[in-house]
Image (cartoon, coloured by chain):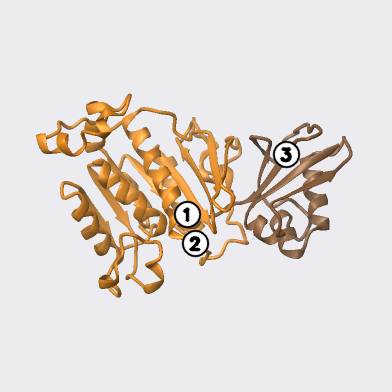
Amino acid sequence: MSKRIPLTDEERAVYEWQMWVDDFGEAGQKKLKGASVLISRVGGLGSVVAYELAAAGIGTLVLAHAGNVKSSDLNRQLLMTHDWLGKPRVESAERRLKDLNPRLNIVAVAENVSEENAAGLVEQVDLIVDCAPLFEERFAMNRQAVLQRKPLVECAMFDLEASITTALPGETPCLACLTPEKPAAWTREFPVFGAVSGTVGCIAAMEAIKVLAGFGEPLTGKMLTFDLRDMTFSRRSITRNPACRVCGNVA
Amino acid sequence: MQLKIRYETLLKRAAGVARQSIDVAETQDVRDIVGELASQANNKVRSMLVDAAGNMQPSLLIFVNDCQVNASDSCPLSDGDEITLMSPISGG
Protein backbone atom coordinates (compact mmCIF):
# COMPACT_ATOMS: atom_id res chain seq x y z
CA MET A 1 0.00 0.00 0.00
CA SER A 2 2.60 2.58 1.08
CA LYS A 3 5.59 3.59 -0.98
CA ARG A 4 8.94 2.29 0.19
CA ILE A 5 11.34 5.15 0.88
CA PRO A 6 15.01 4.39 1.60
CA LEU A 7 16.18 4.97 5.17
CA THR A 8 19.03 7.22 6.23
CA ASP A 9 21.73 5.95 8.59
CA GLU A 10 20.18 8.05 11.37
CA GLU A 11 16.81 6.39 10.82
CA ARG A 12 18.39 2.94 10.86
CA ALA A 13 19.87 3.78 14.24
CA VAL A 14 16.60 5.12 15.64
CA TYR A 15 14.40 2.26 14.42
CA GLU A 16 16.94 -0.55 14.82
CA TRP A 17 15.12 -2.34 17.64
CA GLN A 18 11.72 -2.43 15.94
CA MET A 19 13.31 -3.58 12.68
CA TRP A 20 14.22 -6.73 14.62
CA VAL A 21 10.50 -7.60 14.76
CA ASP A 22 9.76 -10.73 12.72
CA ASP A 23 8.04 -10.01 9.39
CA PHE A 24 8.63 -6.26 9.73
CA GLY A 25 12.33 -5.53 9.23
CA GLU A 26 13.80 -2.74 7.13
CA ALA A 27 11.22 -3.34 4.39
CA GLY A 28 8.43 -2.57 6.87
CA GLN A 29 10.22 0.51 8.14
CA LYS A 30 10.54 1.86 4.60
CA LYS A 31 6.80 1.37 4.12
CA LEU A 32 6.06 3.32 7.30
CA LYS A 33 8.32 6.13 6.12
CA GLY A 34 6.36 6.30 2.88
CA ALA A 35 2.97 6.19 4.59
CA SER A 36 0.52 8.88 5.67
CA VAL A 37 -2.17 8.62 8.34
CA LEU A 38 -5.09 10.89 9.19
CA ILE A 39 -6.06 11.05 12.86
CA SER A 40 -9.50 12.46 13.48
CA ARG A 41 -8.99 14.42 16.72
CA VAL A 42 -5.88 14.15 18.82
CA GLY A 43 -7.62 14.00 22.18
CA GLY A 44 -7.23 11.28 24.79
CA LEU A 45 -7.20 8.54 22.22
CA GLY A 46 -5.80 10.29 19.15
CA SER A 47 -2.91 11.85 21.10
CA VAL A 48 -1.58 8.42 21.92
CA VAL A 49 -2.14 7.09 18.39
CA ALA A 50 -0.21 10.07 17.00
CA TYR A 51 2.59 9.73 19.55
CA GLU A 52 3.11 6.03 18.89
CA LEU A 53 2.99 6.45 15.10
CA ALA A 54 5.44 9.34 15.32
CA ALA A 55 7.77 7.26 17.48
CA ALA A 56 7.50 4.34 15.05
CA GLY A 57 8.61 6.50 12.12
CA ILE A 58 5.46 7.12 10.12
CA GLY A 59 6.19 9.52 7.25
CA THR A 60 3.27 11.93 7.48
CA LEU A 61 0.49 12.59 9.98
CA VAL A 62 -2.55 14.66 9.12
CA LEU A 63 -4.09 15.82 12.40
CA ALA A 64 -7.62 17.26 12.49
CA HIS A 65 -8.75 18.84 15.75
CA ALA A 66 -10.45 22.16 16.43
CA GLY A 67 -10.32 24.35 19.50
CA ASN A 68 -7.90 25.42 22.18
CA VAL A 69 -6.40 23.46 25.05
CA LYS A 70 -8.62 23.42 28.17
CA SER A 71 -7.83 22.34 31.72
CA SER A 72 -10.20 19.38 31.40
CA ASP A 73 -8.13 18.04 28.45
CA LEU A 74 -5.05 17.51 30.56
CA ASN A 75 -5.94 14.25 32.34
CA ARG A 76 -5.70 12.29 29.08
CA GLN A 77 -4.71 14.36 26.02
CA LEU A 78 -1.01 13.66 26.27
CA LEU A 79 -0.02 16.05 23.48
CA MET A 80 -1.51 19.00 25.41
CA THR A 81 0.36 20.75 28.22
CA HIS A 82 -0.36 23.34 30.91
CA ASP A 83 1.76 25.96 29.19
CA TRP A 84 -0.45 25.67 26.10
CA LEU A 85 -3.79 26.35 27.86
CA GLY A 86 -5.93 28.61 25.71
CA LYS A 87 -3.84 27.99 22.60
CA PRO A 88 -4.73 25.77 19.60
CA ARG A 89 -4.69 22.03 20.28
CA VAL A 90 -3.20 21.08 16.90
CA GLU A 91 -0.28 23.45 17.50
CA SER A 92 0.38 21.81 20.85
CA ALA A 93 0.19 18.39 19.21
CA GLU A 94 2.51 19.43 16.39
CA ARG A 95 5.27 20.78 18.66
CA ARG A 96 5.15 17.74 20.97
CA LEU A 97 5.31 15.29 18.06
CA LYS A 98 8.17 17.22 16.46
CA ASP A 99 10.07 17.04 19.76
CA LEU A 100 9.71 13.28 19.62
CA ASN A 101 10.41 12.87 15.90
CA PRO A 102 11.79 15.88 14.02
CA ARG A 103 11.76 13.87 10.78
CA LEU A 104 7.95 13.60 10.85
CA ASN A 105 5.87 15.57 8.33
CA ILE A 106 2.75 17.02 9.96
CA VAL A 107 -0.27 18.58 8.34
CA ALA A 108 -2.09 20.29 11.22
CA VAL A 109 -5.72 21.16 10.51
CA ALA A 110 -7.48 23.20 13.18
CA GLU A 111 -10.89 21.75 12.31
CA ASN A 112 -12.84 18.70 13.35
CA VAL A 113 -13.89 16.29 10.63
CA SER A 114 -17.22 17.20 9.02
CA GLU A 115 -19.22 16.40 5.90
CA GLU A 116 -17.57 19.46 4.33
CA ASN A 117 -13.91 18.63 4.88
CA ALA A 118 -13.85 14.82 5.16
CA ALA A 119 -13.24 14.14 1.46
CA GLY A 120 -10.26 16.48 1.24
CA LEU A 121 -8.69 15.11 4.41
CA VAL A 122 -9.09 11.47 3.41
CA GLU A 123 -7.60 12.18 -0.05
CA GLN A 124 -4.28 13.08 1.58
CA VAL A 125 -3.61 9.79 3.34
CA ASP A 126 -3.18 6.03 3.06
CA LEU A 127 -5.06 5.16 6.26
CA ILE A 128 -7.33 6.79 8.84
CA VAL A 129 -7.59 6.33 12.58
CA ASP A 130 -10.94 7.55 13.83
CA CYS A 131 -10.82 8.89 17.39
CA ALA A 132 -13.67 11.42 17.30
CA PRO A 133 -16.05 11.74 20.26
CA LEU A 134 -19.15 12.36 18.14
CA PHE A 135 -20.89 9.84 15.92
CA GLU A 136 -21.61 12.55 13.34
CA GLU A 137 -17.86 12.99 12.77
CA ARG A 138 -17.31 9.25 12.66
CA PHE A 139 -20.10 8.77 10.12
CA ALA A 140 -18.65 11.49 7.84
CA MET A 141 -15.21 9.89 8.04
CA ASN A 142 -16.57 6.39 7.45
CA ARG A 143 -18.45 7.48 4.31
CA GLN A 144 -15.28 8.94 2.81
CA ALA A 145 -13.15 5.97 3.82
CA VAL A 146 -15.56 3.70 1.95
CA LEU A 147 -15.84 6.00 -1.08
CA GLN A 148 -12.07 6.35 -1.37
CA ARG A 149 -11.38 2.73 -0.37
CA LYS A 150 -9.07 3.67 2.49
CA PRO A 151 -8.56 1.44 5.53
CA LEU A 152 -10.00 2.88 8.70
CA VAL A 153 -9.15 1.92 12.26
CA GLU A 154 -12.33 2.54 14.25
CA CYS A 155 -11.61 2.85 17.95
CA ALA A 156 -13.53 4.28 20.88
CA MET A 157 -13.75 4.18 24.65
CA PHE A 158 -16.16 4.85 27.51
CA ASP A 159 -15.45 4.68 31.23
CA LEU A 160 -12.98 1.76 31.58
CA GLU A 161 -14.16 0.05 28.39
CA ALA A 162 -13.11 0.30 24.76
CA SER A 163 -13.82 -1.19 21.35
CA ILE A 164 -11.73 -1.37 18.20
CA THR A 165 -11.95 -2.85 14.71
CA THR A 166 -10.10 -2.28 11.45
CA ALA A 167 -12.34 -1.71 8.43
CA LEU A 168 -11.24 -2.49 4.87
CA PRO A 169 -13.91 -1.11 2.51
CA GLY A 170 -15.54 -3.82 0.43
CA GLU A 171 -14.09 -6.59 2.58
CA THR A 172 -15.11 -6.02 6.18
CA PRO A 173 -17.95 -4.26 8.03
CA CYS A 174 -17.83 -0.48 7.95
CA LEU A 175 -18.98 1.67 10.86
CA ALA A 176 -22.46 2.04 9.37
CA CYS A 177 -22.84 -1.76 9.13
CA LEU A 178 -22.35 -1.94 12.89
CA THR A 179 -23.95 1.34 13.93
CA PRO A 180 -26.46 2.43 11.28
CA GLU A 181 -27.59 5.42 13.31
CA LYS A 182 -26.38 7.44 16.25
CA PRO A 183 -27.28 5.70 19.51
CA ALA A 184 -29.59 8.03 21.41
CA ALA A 185 -27.85 7.21 24.68
CA TRP A 186 -24.44 8.59 23.60
CA THR A 187 -23.55 12.00 25.02
CA ARG A 188 -20.71 14.40 24.15
CA GLU A 189 -19.11 14.17 27.59
CA PHE A 190 -18.18 10.79 29.03
CA PRO A 191 -16.17 9.31 31.91
CA VAL A 192 -12.54 8.74 30.93
CA PHE A 193 -9.17 7.87 32.39
CA GLY A 194 -6.18 8.63 30.19
CA ALA A 195 -4.87 5.12 30.80
CA VAL A 196 -7.99 3.67 29.13
CA SER A 197 -7.93 5.91 26.05
CA GLY A 198 -4.16 5.36 25.96
CA THR A 199 -4.54 1.58 25.99
CA VAL A 200 -6.88 1.52 23.02
CA GLY A 201 -4.74 4.23 21.37
CA CYS A 202 -1.69 1.97 21.50
CA ILE A 203 -3.70 -0.91 20.02
CA ALA A 204 -4.99 1.39 17.26
CA ALA A 205 -1.46 2.54 16.42
CA MET A 206 -0.36 -1.08 16.16
CA GLU A 207 -3.31 -1.84 13.88
CA ALA A 208 -2.25 1.03 11.60
CA ILE A 209 1.36 -0.17 11.55
CA LYS A 210 0.32 -3.74 10.68
CA VAL A 211 -1.96 -2.64 7.83
CA LEU A 212 0.56 -0.16 6.40
CA ALA A 213 3.55 -2.49 6.62
CA GLY A 214 1.55 -5.60 5.65
CA PHE A 215 2.29 -7.99 8.46
CA GLY A 216 0.48 -9.66 11.37
CA GLU A 217 -3.30 -10.07 11.58
CA PRO A 218 -5.23 -6.83 11.96
CA LEU A 219 -8.69 -6.78 13.52
CA THR A 220 -10.39 -7.09 10.14
CA GLY A 221 -13.85 -8.62 10.50
CA LYS A 222 -13.20 -8.72 14.24
CA MET A 223 -14.08 -6.41 17.09
CA LEU A 224 -11.94 -6.33 20.20
CA THR A 225 -13.66 -5.04 23.31
CA PHE A 226 -12.15 -4.78 26.73
CA ASP A 227 -12.99 -3.62 30.21
CA LEU A 228 -10.03 -2.57 32.33
CA ARG A 229 -12.27 -2.67 35.43
CA ASP A 230 -11.98 -6.47 35.51
CA MET A 231 -9.44 -6.96 32.67
CA THR A 232 -11.87 -8.80 30.40
CA PHE A 233 -10.80 -8.86 26.75
CA SER A 234 -13.09 -10.29 24.03
CA ARG A 235 -12.37 -10.70 20.32
CA ARG A 236 -15.50 -11.43 18.34
CA SER A 237 -16.50 -11.82 14.69
CA ILE A 238 -18.48 -9.03 13.07
CA THR A 239 -20.35 -9.16 9.77
CA ARG A 240 -21.13 -6.81 6.91
CA ASN A 241 -24.70 -5.68 6.56
CA PRO A 242 -25.78 -6.35 2.94
CA ALA A 243 -28.31 -3.52 3.31
CA CYS A 244 -25.73 -1.05 4.65
CA ARG A 245 -26.45 2.39 3.18
CA VAL A 246 -22.72 3.21 3.04
CA CYS A 247 -20.94 0.04 1.88
CA GLY A 248 -23.77 -2.32 0.93
CA ASN A 249 -23.04 -1.96 -2.81
CA VAL A 250 -19.23 -1.93 -2.49
CA ALA A 251 -17.51 -5.14 -3.55
CA MET B 1 -32.87 -23.50 28.55
CA GLN B 2 -30.61 -21.16 30.44
CA LEU B 3 -28.74 -18.32 28.73
CA LYS B 4 -26.05 -16.00 30.02
CA ILE B 5 -26.59 -12.32 29.32
CA ARG B 6 -23.64 -9.99 29.29
CA TYR B 7 -23.99 -6.21 29.15
CA GLU B 8 -21.23 -3.95 27.85
CA THR B 9 -20.55 -0.19 27.83
CA LEU B 10 -23.49 2.12 28.58
CA LEU B 11 -25.84 -0.82 28.96
CA LYS B 12 -23.70 -2.24 31.73
CA ARG B 13 -23.69 1.06 33.55
CA ALA B 14 -27.46 1.49 33.14
CA ALA B 15 -28.23 -2.09 34.16
CA GLY B 16 -25.94 -1.91 37.17
CA VAL B 17 -24.77 -5.47 36.49
CA ALA B 18 -22.35 -6.95 33.97
CA ARG B 19 -23.96 -10.36 33.74
CA GLN B 20 -27.17 -12.20 34.48
CA SER B 21 -28.70 -15.57 33.69
CA ILE B 22 -32.19 -16.10 32.34
CA ASP B 23 -34.38 -19.13 31.72
CA VAL B 24 -36.20 -19.06 28.41
CA ALA B 25 -38.25 -21.39 26.26
CA GLU B 26 -36.26 -23.26 23.60
CA THR B 27 -38.34 -21.65 20.85
CA GLN B 28 -37.27 -18.11 21.69
CA ASP B 29 -34.89 -16.29 19.36
CA VAL B 30 -32.60 -13.33 20.02
CA ARG B 31 -35.31 -10.80 19.22
CA ASP B 32 -37.69 -12.41 21.74
CA ILE B 33 -35.00 -12.40 24.38
CA VAL B 34 -34.12 -8.74 23.90
CA GLY B 35 -37.83 -7.94 24.13
CA GLU B 36 -38.15 -9.94 27.32
CA LEU B 37 -35.12 -8.26 28.88
CA ALA B 38 -36.52 -4.86 27.89
CA SER B 39 -39.86 -5.63 29.54
CA GLN B 40 -38.10 -6.38 32.84
CA ALA B 41 -35.55 -3.55 32.70
CA ASN B 42 -35.43 -0.02 34.05
CA ASN B 43 -36.27 2.84 31.69
CA LYS B 44 -32.67 3.58 30.76
CA VAL B 45 -31.85 0.02 29.80
CA ARG B 46 -35.16 -0.41 28.02
CA SER B 47 -34.53 2.68 25.86
CA MET B 48 -31.15 1.25 24.78
CA LEU B 49 -32.69 -2.09 23.85
CA VAL B 50 -35.95 -1.09 22.15
CA ASP B 51 -37.64 2.04 20.85
CA ALA B 52 -40.96 3.43 22.08
CA ALA B 53 -42.83 1.03 19.79
CA GLY B 54 -40.95 -1.95 21.18
CA ASN B 55 -38.78 -2.48 18.10
CA MET B 56 -35.16 -3.38 18.66
CA GLN B 57 -32.83 -0.38 18.54
CA PRO B 58 -30.96 -0.47 15.21
CA SER B 59 -27.69 0.54 16.86
CA LEU B 60 -27.77 -2.25 19.46
CA LEU B 61 -24.83 -4.62 18.93
CA ILE B 62 -25.64 -8.25 19.64
CA PHE B 63 -23.22 -11.15 19.87
CA VAL B 64 -24.08 -14.79 20.47
CA ASN B 65 -20.95 -16.27 21.99
CA ASP B 66 -18.18 -14.87 19.75
CA CYS B 67 -20.26 -13.97 16.69
CA GLN B 68 -22.27 -10.87 15.90
CA VAL B 69 -25.88 -11.44 14.90
CA ASN B 70 -28.35 -9.05 13.32
CA ALA B 71 -31.78 -8.77 14.83
CA SER B 72 -33.26 -10.03 11.59
CA ASP B 73 -31.01 -13.10 11.49
CA SER B 74 -32.38 -16.45 12.42
CA CYS B 75 -29.91 -17.52 15.04
CA PRO B 76 -30.56 -20.81 16.80
CA LEU B 77 -29.76 -20.68 20.49
CA SER B 78 -28.58 -23.47 22.72
CA ASP B 79 -28.54 -23.98 26.45
CA GLY B 80 -25.57 -22.16 27.98
CA ASP B 81 -25.09 -19.66 25.13
CA GLU B 82 -23.84 -16.22 26.07
CA ILE B 83 -25.62 -13.22 24.54
CA THR B 84 -23.66 -9.98 24.72
CA LEU B 85 -25.53 -6.70 24.32
CA MET B 86 -23.54 -3.55 23.67
CA SER B 87 -24.50 0.02 23.05
CA PRO B 88 -21.93 1.55 20.63
CA ILE B 89 -19.49 4.06 22.10
CA SER B 90 -17.61 6.98 20.62
CA GLY B 91 -15.29 8.30 23.31
CA GLY B 92 -12.03 9.58 21.94
The image quarter containing residue B11 is bottom right
The image quarter containing residue A28 is top left
Q: Chain of mark 3?
A: B
Number of the label disc, if any, that sits on residue A59: none
Using the image, determine if residue A121 lies above or below residue A3. Answer: below
Question: Which mark is nearer the camera, 1 or 3?
Answer: 1
Q: Nearer the viewer, residue A121 or A93?
A: A93
Q: Are marks 1 and 2 in contact (CB under 8 Å)?
A: yes
Q: Chain of mark 2?
A: A
Task: Look at mark 2 in the image and give the residue it sits on.
Answer: A192
Distance in Å between CA atoms under marks 1 and 2:
7 Å
x and y percentages locating residue B82 in the rendered image: 72, 39
Q: Is residue B59 visible?
A: no
User: What amino acid is at disc 2?
Assistant: Val
Residue sitting at 34 percent across and 37 percent down? A209
Distance in Å between CA atoms under marks 2 and 3:
28 Å
The image quarter containing residue A92 is bottom left
Q: Nearer the viewer, residue B29 or B4?
A: B4
Task: Look at mark 3 in the image and give the residue it sits on.
Answer: B82
Using the image, determine if residue A231 lies above or below residue A73. Answer: above
Which chain's colour is orange? A
Q: Residue furthest top?
A: A23
